[in-house]
Image (cartoon, grey):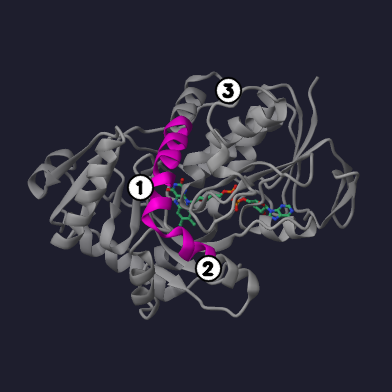
Amino acid sequence: MGKKCLIIGGGIIGLNIAYYLLKEGHEVTVIDKGDLTSGASYINAGYITPSHFIPLSSPGIITKGLKWMLNSNSPFYVKPRLNSDFLNWAWNFKKSANQTKVDKAIPAIKNINLFSRDLYQSMQGSADFDFEFDRKGILMCYKLEETGHEEGKVAEIALKEGLNVKHLSREELKSIEPNVDFDVMGAYFYDTDAHMTPDDFMRDMIAFLKKKGVKFIVSEEVEDFKIINGRIEVVKTKTREILVEEVILAAGTWTSKLAKKLAIPIPLEAGKGYSFNVKKETGISIPAVLVEARVAVTPMNGFTRFAGTMELSGINECISKKRVEAIVNAAESYYKDLKIDIEVINNAKSGLRPCSPDGLPYIGRSNTVKNLVFATGHAMMGWSLGPATGKLVSEIISETKLSLDINPFSPDRKF
Ligand SMILES: Cc1cc2nc3c(=O)[nH]c(=O)nc-3n(C[C@H](O)[C@H](O)[C@H](O)COP(=O)(O)OP(=O)(O)OC[C@H]3O[C@@H](n4cnc5c(N)ncnc54)[C@H](O)[C@@H]3O)c2cc1C
C-alpha cells in the first residue's frame, strides 16, 4: 500500500525523491514556497561529479580561506557573524577539516556519486522522458605549476579509488578540445564525469511528475508542524493544513530553519554561487574547472554556462557584481578567444548551496520524529546526487533494502 508523502522543497532533490517514490507506488505531493523556476537547482553548472570526491572541509581550506577572505575577487568568501548557528557551523567545519575525517568521507562521496550518475543514465534510458546527459568527462585546467602539483596528488587518490584520470599537456589538451585556445599549463582529465542542462531537466521532470499524478503546491511556504505522539500529523502553511503520513524535508538551505521548528539541529550554511550563460559560439565542448579561479564551465543545450564563487554570507540571494566580474575575468584569462558581453554579466543569477559542515549530505530518518526523513546538505554536489538521494529516500520510506550504506549521511551524526 502506498503511503501519503509530502515533500517539502521542489529543487533537484525534492523532484528526484518524488520520481522514485512514485515508482514505488506512493501518493506524492511536492510543496514549494517558490514557483519552481529559479534557485540553485536551475542555475548550477550541471556537472555529474564522481571527480569531486574531496569535501570542501579539507585540510588547507582554512588557511586558503583566511587568505581569500581578504580579497573581494576571491572564489571563496566567509562573512564572519556573531550568530550562534553560524559559529556552531564554523566550529564543526573546522573540526571536520582534518585528514582522518576526509579520508573516511572520500569513499562515501565517491560511491554515492557513481551510484547517482548510473541512476541518471538509467533514467535517461527509460521511456519516462528524454533529456540530455553527456558523458564527456571533465577537465581540471591549471595555470600554475604549484596547482598542477596539487591536482596531481588528487589524481593519485582518484586512481587509488578506481576513477579513471590522466594528465594532459597543453598540446594534448588541444587535440581533445581543438576549437579552444587555452592559456593553461595543463589539465587532468576525468572521464568519469558527465553533464546536463539543469533548466531543461527540471522543466521536463516536473511535467513528467505532473502527468503521472504527483500533486504540486507552489508559492506556499511551510511554516509549522503539528506533532502528536512523536509524529508529524499536520504540515501548516498560511492558508492550509495538510494531513501527512510521511514528510520529507528537502528544502535546501532553508531546511535547518524548518528543522528548528521541530527542535532538531541540522547545521547548514548557505553557500552562494553565481552563474551566467554565453549564447554565442565558444568552441567549448568539454566541461572544465578552471582550478585556480574555481570557475566551472559547461557546454549546455544552446549555450555555455560559467559558474563560480562560494560565498558564505547567510541566506540572501543578492548578486555581487564584483564577484561576477571575477568569474568573467577568470574565464577570459583561461580561454584566450573568449569575450563575454556586458548584457551577459548583467543577467547573472545566484543560487544557494545547502552546505553541511563536513561536506556530506544529510539523508535519513530523524531519530526524534518518526515519520520525518531528511534529504539535504548536498552543497556543491546536489545536482549530481539528486537520483541517489531520491532512490535512497524511497527505499527508506518503502522499508526496502538500501542500495548504499547511509550511515555517513545520518542527520544525527556528530561532527
Ligand atoms: C553556482 C552553482 C553551481 C553549482 N554547480 C553544481 C554542479 O555542477 N553539480 C552539482 O552536483 N551541484 C552543483 N551545485 C549545487 C546544487 O545546485 C545544489 O546542491 C542543489 O541545487 C540543491 O538542491 P536542493 O533541492 O537541495 O535545494 P534547492 O534547489 O534550494 O531547493 C529547495 C527548495 O525548497 C523550497 N523551500 C525552502 N523552504 C521552504 C518552505 N518553508 N516551504 C516550502 N518550500 C520551501 C525552496 O523554494 C526551493 O525551491 C551548484 C550550485 C551553485 C549555486
The magenta segment is 92-116
Q: Is residue 7 left or right of residue 392?
A: right
Q: Position of residue 347 (x, y in %)?
A: 47, 63
- Cβ at disc 1 under 8 Å from ligand 1: yes
Q: Which residue is mark 2?
A: 91
Q: What's under tag 3, amino acid-wise?
A: Asp
Local packing at callout 3 (Cα closer than 10 Å; few below 14, some 14-19, many 20+) is few
Ranked by sequence position, the earlier of labels 2 and 1 is 2
Q: Nearer the viewer, residue 229 or 45?
A: 229
Circle on res. 128: 3
Q: Quadrant of the N terminus?
A: top right
Q: Which residue is mark 1?
A: 298
Tell which residue pokes out farthest to the left in this image.
Answer: 171
Mark 2 and mark 1 residues within 8 Å of each other at the beta carbon = no
Q: Position of residue 208 (x, y in %)?
A: 64, 29
Please identify the quarter of the rendering in which residue 301 is found: top left
Residue at 15% in and 59% down:
183
Ranked by sequence position, the earlier of labels 3 and 1 is 3
Q: Position of residue 122 (x, y in %)?
A: 48, 23
Mark toward the viewer: 2 or 1? 2
